Amino acid sequence: MEVIITSEGSIGELVADDIAALLAGKPDAVLGLATGSSPLRIYDSLAARVQRGDVSFARARGFTLDEYVGLPAGHPCGYRTVIDDEFVSRVDFAAGAVRAPDGAASDLAAEAESYDRSITEAGGVDLQILGIGTDGHIAFNEPGSSFASRTRVKTLTEQTRRDNARFFGGDIDAVPRHCLTQGLGTIMQARRIILVAIGKGKAEAVHQLVEGAVSALWPATILQHHPHVTVLIDAAAASRLQLAGYYRYAYANRVAVA
Ligand code: GLP
């Protein structure tokens, strides 16, 4: 696992560089897209690059990680709306190229299964962007999630609903109690994973993710078993890391690998 500690602005640029390099070599790449505040700088940078004509998503496809259950289609807090507003509508994806699980489906189990299958049928995710919850969740895989889990319905923790209430006008009662989420086993099949985290509130979760024991209590720790993960964090999110000095040293002295 590579850990890069840098400013929020350069996190956005570095991840956008990686995505641009992937698309240059594989224009029809499959991207795993995350919602939440952490990836916003990445999407801003990519939108600017598309405007300048430096990058194109015209042949790429995308899959989002998760969705609330029960919000009507088009709800402003639904992750389908959020990813469309913050990223998809600002770049040049072909119509229908970005899929998201449908949290308003009448048969949620069938929707989960078909969503998971569609990722496999697309050839799997080349590069997955992830954020992390304060309780260590990735996508919406809350503590206790099976490391082998596939896309399914999960119940959100109080902590996650409290954290996400800011998107619902501060009203925790407006935050749904359930979600559809890619499983940890689904996410682990991505060929490359880039996790971004900003701010002190993420410091404990980042410490557990990078340096803690692999445990169902901190679902993100499963990423220690993935062969190609990059964790990009700002100094505040890195403030609990025991080996922060080493990660900074390793990055400053990195070797260019072809
Ligand atoms: C939500 C999402 C996650 C996201 C996390 C952190 O719960 N389901 O995919 O990583 O929040 O969000 P933020 O980046 O806004 O802190």
Image (cartoon, helix red, strand yellow):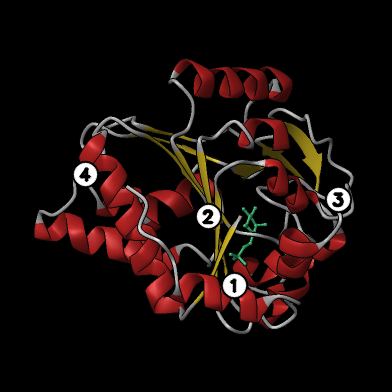
Spatial separation of the CA atoms under disc 1 and disc 4 = 36 Å
Image vertical order of residue 77 relative to residue 116, above or below: below
- Residue 191 screen position, x and y as percent: 50, 35
In the drawing, what numbered circle is on residue 247? 1
In the drawing, what numbered circle is on residue 212? none
Q: Earlier in the sequence, mark 1 or mark 2?
A: 2
Q: Give amino acid for label 3.
A: Pro
Residue name at image x 65 percent, y 48 percent: 139
Q: Quadrant of residue 256?
A: bottom left
In the drawing, what numbered circle is on residue 92? 4
Image vertical order of residue 42 relative to residue 119, above or below: below
Spatial separation of the CA atoms under disc 4 and disc 3 = 36 Å
Of badges 3 and 2, the one in the foreground is 3
The quadrant of the image that shows the N terminus is bottom right
Mark 4 in CB contact with mark 3 (< 8 angstroms): no
Image vertical order of residue 114 relative to residue 125, above or below: above
- Badge 2: residue crowd in 10 Å (few <14, some 14–19, many ≥20): many
Q: Give amino acid for label 2.
A: Thr
